[in-house]
Amino acid sequence: MRSVVVALLLAACGQPVAKKVERLPPADVPPPVAEKPVPPKRPARVAFSVAPSPTSIAIQGDQLYWTDALGSIWTMPSTGGTPRQLSDQRSPDFAFKVVSTGTGVVASTRKDLLRVGETVTKLNIRGLVEYPEEIVADEAFVYITMFKKSQIMRVPIGGGNAQQIGDLARGVLALHGDTLYVVSYANGVLVAIPKAGGKPRTIAKGLVRPTALAADATHAFVYSEKDKTVQSIELATGAATVIAKNLVNSDDMVADGAWLYTRSWDKGSKGTLVRIAKDGSSQTAIGADLAAPYNIAFDADAIYVTARDGAQIVRFEKAALAP
């Protein structure tokens, strides 16, 4: 009977009204953050196979440029790729050495310079009476010594007349700031010459058969082929300190931050790429088994060395080097 009454009441009153629930506005939720892709880790050392006998090397932007023993110029990306030939010894001429100017690449050739780009063209320099031997460059000029000549010449990178700015027999060159540093293989004198021209200043004497030179704001660094050492020489006083020993044929050396990089190898044996602390605190072989290491270049990420007899350019990642 009670169930009948309840049913009648429900029928009369209708279904119970559901209680209304107020919904709060959603809290501010930050949009999802897209994860930045992580570039793949590069191997500590990688060897790029190239045409036989690579010799000099330069880097401009993300491209490597190098010469070979036949006088050709080649290029490829600094991370590797297919080498591409830009010139040969006849078109337009035999290339001896490539250097970066900071904005481009030039090469030395017979009594002239070459502008290196997608095409290679002669600059038709006037006043180079002999083949270039040593060559360094900045954004405005190329600085040159000549075979069997003592004159030190300055040439605009766009071409024109060569101008003599110094005189030192068998000079080895290095640039830093507004100064060209020159050390003589013949007489062992190290001098500083203003790049704009002017009287040279003697820094040191008595260096024995120097064949490689680098410089920074406070010191010059000189390799002696006879002593097989690298000396750090104070630019202000000429005081010298040996910072590396037992280096063989280390005729190429570059300065990068707190470090020097050079090669060491003897005929008939494999060579090494050597890193030297400028303060003399360490001397480390960072790359062994290089077949005739020849020339060295660097950028922000890596060190590059041509292995002449191995037909390779070997790249060493800076991030993988021990501090």
Image: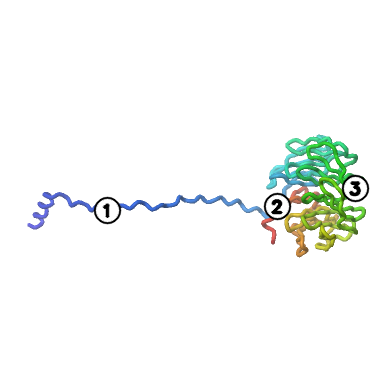
How far is the residue under mark 2 from the one under mark 1? 65 Å
Which residue shows up at 77% across the image and 62% down it? 279
Q: Visible in this render: residue 70?
A: no
| Residue lying furthest bottom | 281
What crowding class fits label 2: few (fewer than 14 Cα within 10 Å), some (14-19), or many (20 or more)? Answer: some
Of pointers 2 and 1, the one earlier in the residue sequence: 1
**Mark 3 sits on what residue?**
167
Per the rendering, the mark at residue 153 is: none
Which residue shows up at 74% across the image and 54% down it? 256
**Mark 2 sits on what residue?**
302
Secondary structure found at label 1: loop
Q: Tell me the amino acid under the disc marked 3.
A: Asp
**Which is more foreground, mark 2 or mark 1?**
1
Quadrant of the rendered image containing residue 274: bottom right
Which residue shows up at 82% across the image and 41% down it? 155
How far is the residue under mark 1 from the one under mark 3? 96 Å
Left or right for 200, reference 119: right
In the displayed structure, 239 sits above or below 128; it is below
Left or right for 4, reference 26: left
